[in-house]
Image (spheres, rainbow, N blue to C red):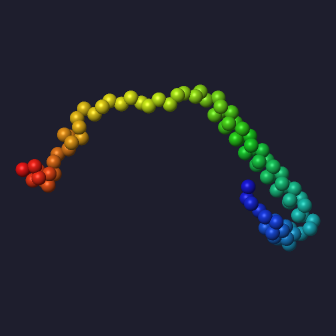
Amino acid sequence: MFDVGFWEMLLLLALGLIILGPNKLPAVALKIGNYIGKARSLVNSFSRQMRQEIELEPKRPMTPKKTKPPSKSSQEELPLTEAENTEDS
């Protein structure tokens, strides 16, 4: 998930040992592990529910919408510019 390699993990362990001390480090590591486990289970539950909802949604065929043809051509609707007026004459 976070791509933590061996050296990064070793550095985090050393920092935790220095900051927390050898007495508190196991308890804190256990709490962090529990939080990570809960977060993973929530993500898995959410993705499972989303997959179920997608499967339950009725599938309808993709048909193009019918549109009316334009009443006038775009050339008739737009006024001519001065350059076009001089070219015609």
* Residue 27 visible within the image: yes
Rendered view: 73 above or below 25 = above
Q: In which quarter of the image is residue 69?
A: top left
Q: State how many labels appear.
A: 0
- Where residue 29 appears, as percent x and y from the top left, is 86, 59
- Where residue 32 appears, as percent x and y from the top left, is 82, 56
Q: Which residue lies furthest to the front in this view?
A: 88
Q: In which quarter of the image is residue 41?
A: top right
Rendered view: 43 above or below 63 = below
Judge by depth and name the residue closer to the eye, 24 or 8: 8
What residue do we see at 10% from left, 49% from top?
A: 88
- Where residue 21 appears, as percent x and y from the top left, is 89, 69
Q: Residue furthest right?
A: 23
Judge by depth and name the residue closer to the eye, 32 or 53: 53
Judge by depth and name the residue closer to the eye, 35 or 71: 71
What residue do we see at 67% from left, 37% from top?
A: 50
What residue do we see at 87% from left, 56% from top?
A: 30
Q: Which residue lies furthest to the left in this view?
A: 89
What residue do we see at 76% from left, 49% from top?
A: 39
Q: In which quarter of the image is residue 5?
A: bottom right
- Where residue 13 appears, as percent x and y from the top left, is 85, 67
* Residue 16 visible within the image: no
Left or right: 29 as drawn, with respect to 45: right
The quadrant of the picture occupied by the N terminus is bottom right
